[in-house]
């Protein structure tokens, strides 16, 4: 599971942000679109999680963001190549 979040903005006097949730299985793809507001450098926040966050980075929302899995000593590591 994961979420893509924009930077915060003020709406009707409250701070808010846009979020796009996704749940991927091996080999699946998802398309996420946003109009911002973005973090500096046209970036969004990417968080990979189960019950709790496992990996977070800020990355550009242009092109493909590849999420990778690495298994090592009975531990599965999830990460993405953030730019």
Image (cartoon, helix red, strand yellow):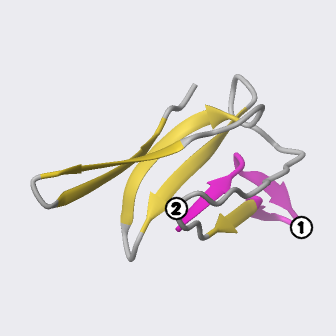
| Rendered residue at 52%/68% (across/down) | 1
Does the segment drawn in magenta span residue 13?
Answer: yes
In the displayed structure, 37 sits above or below 25; it is above
Name the one closer to the observer, 38 or 12: 38
Judge left or right: residue 67 versus residue 62: left
Badge 2 density bin: few <14, some 14–19, many ≥20, Cα 10 Å: few
Q: Residue at x 90, y 45 (%)?
A: 35
- Direction bottom: furthest residue: 51
Q: Is residue 50 visible?
A: yes
The residue stretch that appears in magenta: 1-18
Query: For the residue labelled by badge 2, is the local secondary structure a helix, a strand or a loop?
Result: loop
What kind of element bears circle 1? loop
Residue 11 falls in image quadrant: bottom right
Mark 1 Cα-neighbour bin, 10 Å: few <14, some 14–19, many ≥20: few
Image coords of residue 21 (percent x, y): 67, 67
- Point out the residue furthest to the front here: 27
Quadrant housing the C terminus: top right
List the residue tagged with mark 2.
26
**Which residue is depicted at the point 9% across and 53% down?**
73
Which residue is label 1 attached to?
A: 12
Q: Is residue 77 left or right of residue 8?
A: left
Q: Quadrant of residue 66?
A: top right
- Residue found 75% across the figure and 29% down from its top: 42
The spot of residue 61 in percent (x, y) is 74, 37
């Amino acid at each position: 599971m994961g979420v893509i979040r924009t930077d915060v903005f003020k709406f009707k006097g409250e701070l808010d942000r846009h979020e796009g949730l996704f749940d991927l299985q091996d080999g699946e793809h998802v398309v996420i679109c946003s109009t911002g507001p973005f973090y500096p450098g046209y970036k969004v926040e990417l968080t990979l999680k189960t019950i709790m966050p496992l990996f977070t980075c800020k990355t550009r929302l242009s092109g493909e963001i590849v999420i990778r899995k690495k298994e090592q000593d009975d531990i599965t590591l999830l990460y993405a190549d953030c730019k």
